[in-house]
């Protein structure tokens, strides 16, 4: 039984105002009219108080079929009482006359099977059958034997009761399907939103890592060009401006590639850089004025594309922070291919700013590094080691 059905049974006002209540009222009126018409046409003459009382009782219990589901057991009990009351008020009725509440009793059995739980429904149906058998036994001499009376009484009550149970079971099954569909729809919408958020986060990290690196290089080269022009050594200014041009071009290429991804138009030729492109990255860093060396140990292997790009971006972000906050001493990039993991470490000299202040100033950069590493089940460690700052990233190669 669904939540809506429970609310209907708990609040009669909802039942009376709802479409189920209107349908139940129509059924009750039809049953009352039909049973009354059958009794008037085929029953005893309505010239004494006994048949009139019996007619009124049949109409009342039939109209009670419009009551909310919480009263189903009581309504079925009233119909059972009419079964027994009928032979007591009208003894000796001929066997050809139908039951005074025949149609109403069928609907009462149906409602009991539909609305009540298994045990209460079984008790109500058994009560109706017993009342029918007792009524027949009081009213008429069972010349054909009790077996036929019991069989017909049981069939006339059990069949509508089982149909009612089948109806509510089918309805409950459909309600479960609807709830399951709604739940799957909500889960799919949540998954889509999370996937979109993850994609946006990844693109934001790429924009931050790539553009911040190039813009830092542009800023350093522009400052060098300004100083070179002031001191009038033409060669130094030309080299610095050339580096500014190269860094800005790289920034524009990265921006265009990410915008193409946002528009759903990735180019195969614009494959994102990986660890194989670290040496090209170091060329730009050296041109910006930071000496840096690369050391690769272990047996190099092909990495999953997403991990390869993530590690490249991590190295790029670490060198960008070294350009911004380091003291310009020799920086080192170590890539170690272990048996079941890959270790990337970037070390550079500390600047004048305290290490805690530098860590705070990294902001989105450090958060982006941690996010990337967590996606692959890796570990991140960073902090000062003497006069240097070191970033260490270890990612298991079986995480993908």
Image: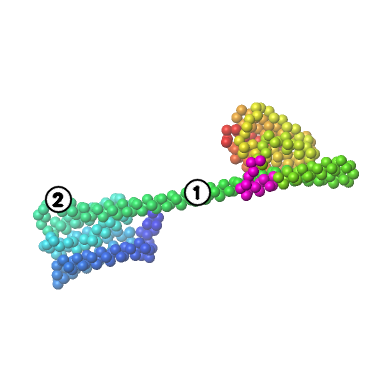
**In percent of the image, x 79 and y 42: which residue is there?**
243
In-image side of 234 versus 394 (left or right): right
| 198 magenta-colored | no
In-image side of 96 versus 392 (left or right): left
**Quarter occupied by residue 70:** bottom left
State the SS at label 2: helix
- Label 1 and label 2: CA atoms lie apart by 58 Å
Which dot marks residue 107? none
Characterize the local packing of mark 2: few (<14), some (14-19) or many (20 or more) Cα atoms within 10 angstroms. Answer: few
Q: Nearer the viewer, residue 130 or 176?
A: 176
**Quarter occupied by residue 329:** top right
**In percent of the image, x 59 and y 46: which residue is there?**
198
State the SS at label 1: helix
Q: Nearer the viewer, residue 210 or 258?
A: 258
x, y percent for residue 353: 77, 43
**In percent of the image, x 38 and y 63: which residue is there?**
18
Q: Nearer the viewer, residue 149 or 171?
A: 171
Give the residue furthest to the bottom: 47
In-image side of 290 versus 54 (left or right): right
**In percent of the image, x 66 and y 27: which residue is there?**
298
Q: Which residues are magenta?
A: 254-269
Disc nearest the viewer among 1 and 2: 1
Please give the residue where the numbered disc 2 appears in the rendered image. 147
């Amino acid at each position: 039984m669904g939540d809506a059905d429970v609310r209907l049974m708990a609040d009669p006002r909802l039942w009376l105002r709802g479409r189920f209540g209107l349908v139940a009222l129509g059924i009750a009126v039809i049953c009352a009219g039909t049973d009354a018409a059958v009794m008037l046409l085929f029953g005893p003459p309505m010239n004494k108080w006994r048949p009139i009382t019996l007619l009124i009782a049949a109409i009342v219990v039939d109209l009670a079929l419009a009551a909310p589901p919480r009263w189903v057991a009581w309504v079925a009990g009233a119909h059972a009482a009419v079964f027994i009351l009928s032979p007591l008020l009208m003894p000796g009725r001929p066997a050809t006359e139908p039951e005074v509440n025949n149609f109403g009793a069928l609907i009462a059995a149906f409602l009991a099977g539909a609305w009540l739980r298994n045990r209460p429904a079984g008790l109500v149906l058994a009560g109706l059958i017993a009342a029918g058998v007792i009524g027949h036994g009081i009213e008429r001499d069972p010349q054909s034997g009790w077996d036929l009376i019991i069989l017909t009484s049981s069939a006339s009550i059990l069949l509508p009761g089982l149909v009612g149970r089948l109806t509510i079971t089918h309805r409950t099954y459909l309600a479960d399907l609807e709830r399951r569909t709604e739940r799957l729809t909500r889960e799919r919408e949540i998954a889509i939103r999370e996937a979109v958020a993850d994609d946006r986060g990844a693109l934001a990290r790429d924009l931050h890592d790539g553009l911040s690196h190039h813009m830092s290089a542009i800023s350093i080269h522009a400052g060098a060009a300004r100083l070179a022009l002031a001191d009038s050594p033409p060669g130094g200014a030309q080299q610095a401006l050339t580096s500014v041009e190269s860094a800005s071009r790289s920034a524009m290429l990265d921006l265009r590639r990410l915008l193409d991804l946002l528009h759903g138009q990735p180019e195969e030729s614009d494959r994102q850089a990986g660890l194989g492109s670290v040496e090209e990255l170091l060329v730009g860093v050296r041109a910006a004025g930071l000496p840096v060396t690369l050391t690769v140990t272990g047996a190099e292997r092909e990495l999953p594309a997403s991990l390869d790009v993530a590690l490249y971006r991590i190295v790029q972000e670490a060198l960008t922070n070294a350009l911004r906050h380091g003291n310009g001493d020799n920086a080192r990039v170590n890539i170690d291919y272990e048996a079941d993991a890959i270790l990337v470490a970037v070390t550079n000299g500390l600047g004048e700013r305290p290490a805690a202040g530098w860590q705070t100033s990294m902001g989105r950069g450090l958060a982006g590094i941690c996010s990337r590493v967590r996606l692959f089940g890796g570990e991140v460690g960073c902090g000062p080691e003497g006069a240097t700052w070191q970033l260490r990233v270890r990612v298991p190669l079986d995480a993908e």
